[in-house]
Image (cartoon, grey):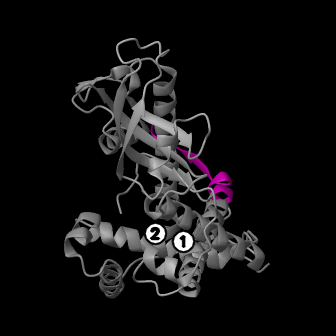
Amino acid sequence: MEAHSMHHFQLGQYKGMKIAPQPAPTETELENAVIQSVLKMLNEWSKNNIVVEEGDEVAVSIFATCDGLAVSELCSSYLKYKVGDPMMFGQFKNVIGKKKADRFQMMIDIPHNSPLQHVAGKKAEFLATVLEVWPSKQLEVTDAIVHEMDPEVPDLKTLKDNIRKSLIAESQQTIKENNLQTILDTFIGSSTYELDEEMLKATTQQVIDNALKDYEIIKNQNANTPFGSSEADEYFYEDCAVFAKQQLLLSLAFTELARVENICISDEEAALGRKQILEGIQGDQQMFDKLFPTPELLKESLLHEKIVNYLFEWNMVEN
């Protein structure tokens, strides 16, 4: 790990903080979340796969012609209506039986009193494409529909079990991250430190450069050209400065903890860590090399993970 000789960091309390873990969701909360996830999946699937019935809402695009010529006044890129609305021409019911991306045709007699004099009293042809569908009825979630939604899932019970496992894993990860953040905030908040301003400035610039590259904010622009003077740009730079300081303090804290507690990663631990990471990414060596281009970066990552585990062991208490 890189030394930070230009900085000064003195550890605060990092053991015995007796931090209570964030509570896990209750069974009722978990079951409600599973149900909501199933309904959300069904809703998204139905928009693309369920055929339109009277009473549904649809959005369509329309291309209108009369006497072989386009009528721009009657064309629309997005028209939303309720199927069966008495205020619409009856031909708009032709959408019944269609689904998203399907097309349907309408032949409509334009009223003689239409303000569009060049088509008044004539027959116009409308070619419509279904853009979106909002079913008026809540579908019943059956095993057959679940299997249509995902051919690899045989029934509703399996789907709910899969969602439940995923939600539990996400919840556990979120709780772990929140608990760790509480430990770090308390630990670093009780520490004393002095940061070298030039090194902090360089770290901040590196964070800014990485952010600009990741989000392609300055695509096709000179890399040395700032955004401008807008308020949004100021917030961006302020956020980068805060993040850079947090990352620098975290690195200093972990470096000092490793020194004081004599925590290190042996070659055997590095080999085991490498094996476990590769198993987690299905043996994708290219991805592994991108994540850890040097053995030192792998050891640094494993060291941070080891320190985090110690921090949990030293500071978390049972509810």
Q: Indicate left or right for 249 with 119 as reference.
A: right
Instruction: Specify the amino acid type for callout 1.
Output: Val
Q: How crowded is mark 2: few (under 14 residues within 10 Å), some or many (20 or more)?
A: some
The one nearer the camera, 218 or 311, is: 218
Q: Where is residue 2 in the image (x, y as percent from the top left)?
A: 35, 58
Q: Are marks 2 and 1 in contact (CB under 8 Å)?
A: yes
**Helix, strand or loop at mark 1:** helix
Task: Find the distance from the CA under tag 2 to the CA under tag 1.
Answer: 6 Å
The one nearer the camera, 192 or 153, is: 153
The one nearer the camera, 315 or 176, is: 176
From the image, tell me which residue sits under label 2: 304
The image quadrant that residue 309 belongs to is bottom right
Instruction: Specify the amino acid type for callout 2.
Output: His
Q: How many labels does the image show?
A: 2
Q: Indicate left or right for 198 with 89 as reference.
A: left
Is the C terminus in the top left, top right, bottom left or bottom right quadrant?
bottom right
In the image, is residue 132 part of the stretch drawn in magenta?
A: no
Compared with residue 54, is residue 256 higher up or lower down, i.e. above or below? Answer: below
From the image, tell me which residue sits under label 1: 308
Compared with residue 314, is residue 131 higher up or lower down, i.e. above or below? Answer: above
The residue shown at (29%, 65%) is 291
Bounds of the magenta segment: 185-198
